[in-house]
Image (cartoon, helix red, strand yellow):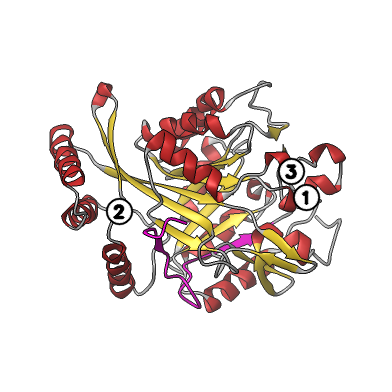
Amino acid sequence: MNFKTVEMPWGGRDVPHGVVEVNQLCNINCFGCCKDKFNYSKSLDEIKTEIDLLFAKRNLAAISLAGGEPLLYEHIFEAVAYINSKNIRSIILTNGTLVTPEILKKLRTAGLSRLVFHIDGHQHGRPDVTYPTSEKKLNSLRAHYLQLCLEAKQEIGFTVTVYQDSLEELKEVLLFCQNNPTVKFLLVMGYSQLVNYNEKISDKYKRSDLSIGPHDTVNYMKRVENATPLFYIPSSHNQNSARWNFYVLSIVDKNRSGVEKLYLTPRIPQVFEVLLFLQRKLKGRFGFDDPSTTVQIIFTLSVHALFSCSLSTIYKTIKIFALALKYRNIRFQTYTFQYPPNQIGENEFEICKNCPDITVRNGNLVPTCLADVIDPLLVRNQI
């Protein structure tokens, strides 16, 4: 890990995120899926109990609802509303195939904060994709869901799983996100055979050669975007090994002339450590990709430039401010890269330190990516 990158100070109760898995059922098959998929959904009372448990254990900014495919869950709107009643952000992670204007309207009414669409070329059985495909071709599908959410005034993000044979295509997804002002967030997940539950079903899924590690994407982002992670979360066993990397960039849309972008860089880590401390003090919690106002963006960029000790960064910041005035817009976009766990013993795994994607399994808090491996559900074949 680059020594200048700032470690997220999340720990103990001060981890701002958790995950509630509402079901195990899904209507498509992702090559690297970590889920043991079968026909099981939790009751609404169970979901509320799990939300309450996460809320009691953590000082939350957001809870993500996942599956399976959460839009198959009959009480999804009630689950969103219950999270909303806690005054925290609600997020749904979906493959999008069940999204309609009517569904979006109901989610908005329930108070959904963000809908995150998982779309990538290693998904199989999507009714909205013609195979073979590529990330560039899939941008038309992303644009379709973006338009639906734009019309519904629903905040949107995207997820893509990257493999060794698709990493070079990531630039197409980045370009799509940068060129669309309504996209606030991109989650990039690295594939690992370790958490690929499908490989227990068929040998065709045993592809360790497709696995992605932190060095792969860090080198890629440096080469393609000339970008360095601003924040990171280390592993549970190695302070210098990243399990999450966060990139933050400011973007100005220049109408039909493309975009101007500036990645924040951790030249002086203490500056961002202070900003995170102030966020915790002012809000009473850490954020989890909270929306940023124009004033917050300008303040952050100004502090970043002032303490960068770089004439180049100061010049680029002045330039982006000038363009923001000219075109009357400026925004932040966040890219979060997540990396899979490593097995380092018979029953020992290297995971994310203070796992931000913790979920509830049989009353225990366990990492979402390993839940079906280390703490499988005690019930099966229930609806």
Sequence-wise first label, 1 or 2: 1
126 lies left or right of 184: right
- Give SS at disc 1: helix
Foreground mark, 2 or 3, reads 3
- By secondary structure, the bulk of the magenta-drawn segment is best described as loop
Quadrant housing residue 137: top right
Q: Is residue 151 visible?
A: no
Task: Residue under label 1, please give it.
Answer: 197
How much space separates mark 3 and mark 1, taking CA atoms?
Answer: 13 Å
Report the amino acid beneath label 2: Ser
Q: Is residue 257 visible?
A: yes
Q: Position of residue 192 (x, y in %)?
A: 68, 48
Kindly report which numbered mark, 3 or 1, lies closer to the viewer in this rendering.
3
| Structural distance between the alpha carbons of marks 2 and 3 | 39 Å
What residue sits 51% from the left and 56% below the top?
Answer: 244
Q: Nearer the viewer, mark 1 or mark 2?
A: 1
Secondary element under disc 2, as helix, strand or loop, is: loop
Q: Which residues are magenta?
A: 1-22
Residue designated by label 2: 292
Q: Amino acid at mark 3?
A: Ser
Question: Which numbered disc, 2 or 3, marks the residue that appears first in the sequence?
Answer: 3
